[in-house]
Amino acid sequence: MVETTYKHNRTPLIAGNWKMNLDHLQAIAFVQKLAWSLKDAGHSSSDVEAAIFPPFTDLRSVQTLVAADKLQLAYGAQDVSQHDSGAFTGEVSGAFLAQLDCTYVIIGHSERRTLHAESDEVVAAKTASAIKHGIVPIICVGETAEDLDKHGPSAVPVAQLKAALAGVTSASDIVVAYEPVWAIGSGQAATPEQAEAVCAALRAVLDETLGSDVASKTRILYGGSVKSTNIGGFMKQPNVDGALVGGASLDLAEFASIIRFQKHAF
Ligand code: 13P
């Protein structure tokens, strides 16, 4: 079993991105069952932090449940507006998410970059907005299969991270998620070695831009077809501090097993 204080005291983070799945009633049932299952198993959030990212419409219900039952579960939104308020139909501001006690917000997911044409500039503005409202941004970066062929493994994620950090200072609390687009929902995860190589390159960017202190305390997650059977390989890598899980985070037993990787994967 790994020490809980390994990797420079970075607490592993297992984050479940529900995408557009589970309404607020389903979210209540899921969160209750997940919290009970982790509690029954003696799970402690100081060993591995678990977080869920439901749709916006679920967040108020999740907030109420987590607060009322003092659940050891963090949560956040899947996106945030770069604006604080005003005529931006359909958008949700960081101020509103802060009122819902969101700890985190996912920014620049590849589905937002491709389906909603989010540029590096928009990702940088959203990152700055999250920080301004006291919410930790989970900055997503990753290359397509075509990028991988053309530019190699880390060029695109490194460029995306550099661009996203435009409004970040060394005092900011951030999380980075490396999600190769070709591994998302494909069942074909990166190998642990591939993930490690890119996560190490991303940590070098943090070191260059924000200093060694931030670089050593920032958690870098891997995402893309993570399951209970492959999480151990990723978590053994020195620069991988957790996972951003899509499909498998909707399966209660599977997600709980990924969160409890220390119990079965080492
Ligand atoms: P999958 O785990 O379904 O591949 O999705 C990964 C993802 O996009 C998480 O943000």
Image (cartoon, rainbow, N blue to C red):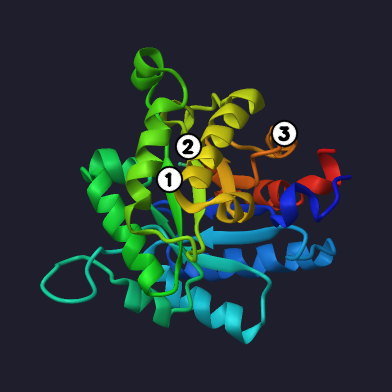
Q: Looking at the picture, does residue 152 appear above or below residue 108?
A: above
At mark 3, the secondary structure is loop
Looking at the figure, which quarter contains the C terminus?
Answer: top right
Mark 3 and mark 1 lie on one chain; the one further toward the N terminus is 1
Q: Nearer the viewer, mark 3 or mark 1?
A: 1
Instruction: Identify which amino acid the numbered label 1 is placed on.
Output: Cys
Cα–Cα span, label 3 and label 1 = 23 Å
Q: Cβ of disc 1 within 8 Å of ligand 1?
A: yes
Q: Quadrant of the N terminus?
A: top right
x and y percent of residue 27 in the render? 51, 66
Q: Can residue 246 be seen at all in this image of the molecule?
A: no
Q: Which mark is residue 179?
A: 2
**Is disc 2 in contact with disc 1, using a CB cutoff of under 8 Å?**
yes
Q: Mark 2 near ligand 1 (CB under 8 Å)?
A: yes
Looking at the rendering, which quadrant does residue 126 occupy? bottom left
**Residue position for label 1:** 140
Q: Nearer the viewer, mark 2 or mark 3?
A: 2
- The x and y percentages for residue 263 are 85, 47
Q: Position of residue 70 (x, y in %)?
A: 67, 81
Label located before the other in sequence (2 or 1): 1
Q: Residue at x 49, y 28 (%)?
A: 183
Q: Nearer the viewer, residue 186 or 262?
A: 262
Q: Please, what secondary structure does the residue beneath circle 1 have?
A: strand
Q: Amino acid at mark 3?
A: Thr
Q: Which mark is residue 229?
A: 3
